[in-house]
Amino acid sequence: MHITTLQDLRALYAPARERSVKKQMSSLDVHATRFIGLSPLVVVASAGMDAAAGLLDASPRGGAPGFVKVLDAHTLLIPDAPGNNRLDSLENIVLTGHTGLLFLLPGVDETLRVNGTAVLSTSAEDIARCTDEKRAPKLVIRVTVQAAYLHCAKALMRSSLWSHEAQVSRNVMPSMGEMMKDQIGGDIPAETQEQMLARYAQDL
């Protein structure tokens, strides 16, 4: 049996609490700005023109705390760093002009959600703002904030994500290269974890 209507969905749950509804802001306040300034990781969500066909994407973007720049209460800049060149998120933003962001802060179980419109900027000013000692990005995701709110801690508390006891050894899984060799086959080299880290170090 599947849920096919919003009425059926809502029938399973109590109404949202008043503070859960009221916490959504249309701009970044001092706390959201501080959270973003301390965050080294944001998950960028996007959808293509035909989301029902599966053109959805969620992509982690990382950097030193403050790598996402807050220009003002309504504007964020996310520098694009070297990756796999699939460009799923970037292509979706070109097509639809929207994104959803989830900022994480190590040791803090609350997260920050930001939704808004987005464009891919190559303006010299935006590039300069996001240039660091390692590189100038090819482009910057410029986000205009439409909604921002703190997300409660329950998910991260349940996962024990930041707990030392919850950490697993990297060797519980094969290296990414070894897994891709199994998945793709052919002439894909079974790159070891050490080889992968050495390759990554060239453009982190």
Image (cartoon, rainbow, N blue to C red):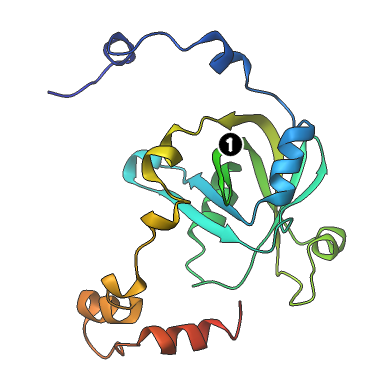
Residue identified by numbered label 1: 113
Image position, residue 201 (x, y; %): 57, 83
- Identified by mark 1, the residue type is Arg
Image position, residue 123 (x, y; %): 82, 60
Residue 50 vs 21, above or below: the answer is below
Who's the residue at 50% across and 46% down the image? Answer: 46
Who's the residue at 33% across and 15% down the image? Answer: 6
Who's the residue at 52% across and 57% down the image? Answer: 60
> Which part of the image, by quadrant, shows the N terminus?
top left
Q: How many discs appear?
A: 1
Q: Classify residue 192 by image quadrant.
A: bottom left
Left or right: 5 as drawn, with respect to 42: left
Farthest residue to the front: give it. 165
Q: SS at mark 1?
A: strand
> Which part of the image, by quadrant, shows the C terminus?
bottom right
Tell me if mark 1 has few (under 14), some (14-19) or many (20+) residues whose alpha carbon lies within 10 angstroms of its own.
Answer: some
Residue 105 vs 24, above or below: the answer is below
